[in-house]
Image: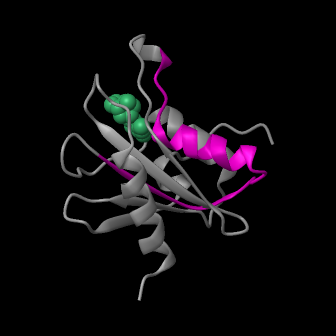
Amino acid sequence: MKTDDDRLLEAATNARRNAYAPYSKYAVGAALADEVGRVHTGCNVENAAFPEGTCAEAIAIGAMVAAGGRRIAAIAIAGGREDLEPCTPCGGCRQKIAEFADASTRILLLDADGTFKACGIDDLLPDSFRLL
Ligand code: THU
């Protein structure tokens, strides 16, 4: 039977297929479950003006917020140039995840062999900056 983790990992892998990454060739997909269980997805969208590119996680978080979600219960991230490679969120995305995460948020990082590693935001970004 598929678990919630499996479903999120599958949604991230599917979103990754739509990544627009002609410059880096590094395609990333992210899928997150919000506080009521809705799933929001994103993929990286690059731009000829390189700094204008956006990470997959940022787009998934934007979709969640636009839909009224305010908390990340779990987020799965899948990335790689061709096949999957272990892909951990960049520094900026760690901060973006932290804004909507708490100690119980599950961060699922898909490995090259199709398994995943689960961690928390404090593992990825200890002592993150917060105003709230
Ligand atoms: N990328 C993401 O989408 N998420 C991350 O956390 C790491 C990096 C994207 C940005 C760029 O389009 C490509 O991966 C290579 O850096």
Residue at figure coordinates x 46%, y 71% from the top left? 7
Q: Can residue 130 be found in the magenta stretch?
A: no
Residue lying at the far top in this picture: please name it: 49
Q: Is residue 20 above or below residue 106?
A: above
Magenta region:
52-79
Residue lying at the far bottom in this picture: please name it: 1
Residue placed most toward the observer, 66 or 128: 66
Q: What is the x, y in percent for residue 29?
A: 41, 48
Residue placed most toward the observer, 103 or 12: 12
Residue at figure coordinates x 51%, y 43% from the top left? 57
Q: Is residue 53 above or below residue 97?
A: above
Residue placed most toward the observer, 91 or 78: 78
Residue at figure coordinates x 41%, y 64% from the top left? 9
Q: Judge left or right: residue 56 versus residue 59.
A: left
Q: What is the x, y in percent for residue 116?
A: 33, 66
Q: What is the x, y in percent for residue 84?
A: 23, 52
